[in-house]
Image (tube, helix red, strand yellow):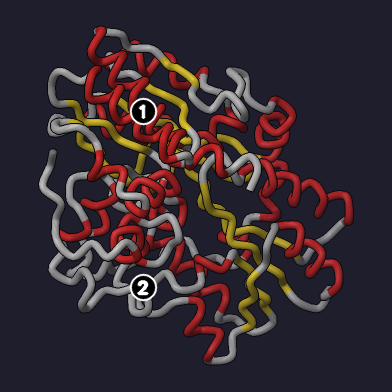
Amino acid sequence: MKYLDEYRDQALARHLLDELRRTATRPWRIMEVCGGQTHTLVRQGIDELLPAGIRMIHGPGCPVCVTPLETLDRAMAIAARPGVIFTSFGDMLRVPGSDTDLLSLRARGADVRVVYTPMDAVRLAAGQPDHEVVFLAVGFETTAPANAMAVLHAVRLGLTNFSMLVSHVLVPPAMTALLDDPDCEVQAFLAAGHVCAVMGWREYEPIAARYRVPIVVTGFEPLDLLEGILMAVSQLEQGRYAVENQYVRAVRRLGNQRAQEAVDEVFHVTDRAWRGMGVLPAGGLELAEPYARFDASRRFAVGDLRPAEDPECIAGAILTGARLPTDCAAYGTRCTPRHPLGAPMVSTEGTCAAFHSAGRTKEVSPS
């Protein structure tokens, strides 16, 4: 397929691996921030093909996985109410809350529907004026513009029965939280290309300078990742700490300014809980006061729930890169994609799901 096959060329992959072997003279530890990148690395076996000493650390880049348990419990509480049509992207339906999940609620009669865009939820609200329609708005900077536009469209339509349960998170605060941890082993980052397509990379420049870590904006195909790793290792070997852009076909330094304007209009930055990382200062977005009437958490008064994590699940340690899925005693036995204990085994971007789908049954020894 044009514009895809060329980023999976085996000869070019071998060339990049050879160049990595020539470049790396010592061990280096690099974190990919995006769950989509994790799936490519694991599915293609790239993490196992890297030269000795180069180790990939899988970061908290799955938007489903980092959604805190309290948000999921609020979603269940709202979805279970009569007269509510609760909408979400499909991968959120099987993520377990404290007691149940949205798919199980639907099986028991709750009106839970899968939508493909937040605009689908707005259109549903316009066509169902006798129901409250709620959209579960999660994700990184990538999904925020579409969610902002949905709210603005609801305003234009004069809808009073549409709201969002918002749990948007921001990537740079998570990176600094990881780097501030005294046990952090990360020496360089591969930044998520789709996030930077929206936001650009200006926010990463102070992080690279302050913590002396290279940050390479990287795409999602095998050659993207190999080239991004090579760029990061080259910087480390040369003692440079800059932000570089591998994903030149999609990302510019300033990002998509029209998308940023929509986000700035509808949302404002707030402290935000991340699953596995706790509350991060300025770690997410919430609806700005002029749009607070669309806040489902306020509309349905579900702000004081007390979640209970499954004691067997080590999702927090996996999301921060401290542990691998194969370190978990429940991995592949009591926790599988069909019967997950935690979000990383559910999502198409979750690290546990990536390992399981690739048939990883034991820890891969660090190179």
Instruction: Say which amino acid is labelled 1.
Output: His
Left or right: 285 as drawn, with respect to 314 = right
Q: Residue at x 34, y 24 (%)?
A: 230
Q: Which mark is residue 337?
A: 2
Q: Can residue 365 be seen from the camera position used here?
A: yes
Secondary element at tag 1? helix
- Depth check, front residue: 203 or 68: 203
Secondary element at tag 2? loop
| Tag 2–tag 1 contact (CB < 8 Å) | no
Q: Which mark is residue 210?
A: none
Q: Residue at x 14, y 61 (%)?
A: 362
Neighbours of disc 1 within 10 Å: few (<14), some (14-19), many (20+): few
Residue 79 lies, with reference to residue 11, above or below; the image says below
Percent across and percent down for residue 60 are 35, 45
Q: Which mark is residue 15?
A: 1
Rendered image quadrant of residue 87: bottom right
Percent across and percent down for residue 5 are 56, 44
Among the two numbered marks 2 and 1 on one chain, the one whose residue lies closer to the N terminus: 1
Left or right: 117 as drawn, with respect to 33 = right
Q: Residue at x 73, y 64 (%)?
A: 121
Percent across and percent down for residue 114 are 63, 71
Neighbours of disc 2 within 10 Å: few (<14), some (14-19), many (20+): many
- Depth check, front residue: 119 or 191: 191
Q: Residue furthest right?
A: 157
Quadrant holding the C terminus = top left
Q: Residue at x 30, y 35 (%)?
A: 31
Residue 260 lies, with reference to residue 83, above or below; the image says above
